[in-house]
Amino acid sequence: MTPEEVGERLAAVLGAAGTGDVAVGVSGGGSHARATVDVPPQDWHAAVRSARDDTELALDFFDWLSAVDELPDGFTLVVHLWSTGHRHGVLLRTRLPREAASAPSVVDLFPGASWHERETHEMFGIDFAGHPDLAPLLLPPEFEGHPLRKEFVLAARVAKAWPGAKEPGESEAGASRRAPMRPPGVPDPAEWGPNRQRPPATGPDGTV
């Protein structure tokens, strides 16, 4: 099935039992393009189940799950599923509000989603209703905040001044741009190659 057909098939399956609108599209990437299907949060679990159980889709492999911080618009929760038999995939997405962001857990459908939901909970502060244990995964228990939220302050910038030039407009030296740098091991063009600057010819007595 083409990405367009995958998206249309999943939308048709969800349309019969869904509770809200479904939007279908195709991601970029040329030959690696995937169908994108956006569903309301209340249809999240049903959409993942339908993608797995529909015989024409048979998206039986859980690849990954994460989120994107959309600032005032909340968070976009994304899961990528793949069919090992039909060799096609889908990016299933839902938009969650910024305050009290929560979605149903899909661990009962794909046990491998447990690690991904724990990481997304830890990094973005999104809850997954029904997850057996959203314990910290990567950060110490006493850590405060969610590092992948865009308003999270990088402590290193607060504790220590950033060396050298910073982002455009931040440089304390007032330089408009950084001086070009050669990679290690690359000689100066003036010393090697067709543009090298040869020393002036000298006579037998050493004069030019």
Image (cartoon, helix red, strand yellow):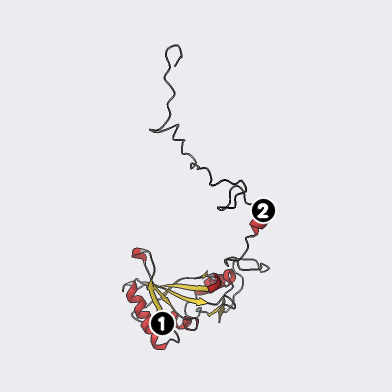
> Residue 91: horizontal and vertical position, in percent?
42, 72
Q: Is the N terminus in the top left, top right, bottom left or bottom right quadrant?
A: bottom left
Q: Which residue, given by chain and number where applicable, does mark 2 sit on?
A: 160
Mark 1 residue crowding within 10 angstroms, few (<14) / some (14–19) / many (20+)? some
Towards the viewer: 6 or 203 = 203
The first of marks 1 and 2 along the sequence is 1
> Residue 133: horizontal and vertical position, in percent?
59, 77
Query: Which residue corresponds to the image point at 42% horizontal and 31% vertical from the top-left?
Result: 196
Q: Is residue 86 visible?
A: no
Q: Is residue 146 left or right of residue 61?
A: right
* Amino acid type of the residue that numbered disc 2 sits on in the rendered structure: Lys
> Residue 46: horizontal and vertical position, in percent?
45, 83
Dot 2: element: loop
- Separation (CA) of disc 1 from disc 2: 50 Å
Dot 1: element: helix
- Above or below residue 168? Residue 117 is below
Towards the viewer: 4 or 50 = 4
Q: Is residue 169 visible?
A: yes
* Amino acid type of the residue that numbered disc 1 sits on in the rendered structure: Ser
Query: Which residue corresponds to the image point at 59% horizontal and 78% vertical from the top-left?
Result: 100
Label for residue 4? none
**How many numbered marks appear?**
2
- Above or below residue 192? Residue 72 is below
> Residue 33: horizontal and vertical position, in percent?
36, 67
Mark 2 residue crowding within 10 angstroms, few (<14) / some (14–19) / many (20+)? few
Quadrant hosting residue 208 = top left
Query: Which residue corresponds to the image point at 43% horizontal and 17% vertical from the top-left?
Result: 202
Q: Nearer the viewer, mark 1 or mark 2?
A: 2
Q: Are marks 1 and 2 in contact (CB under 8 Å)?
A: no
Residue, far left: 1
Quadrant hosting residue 9 = bottom left
Label for residue 50? 1
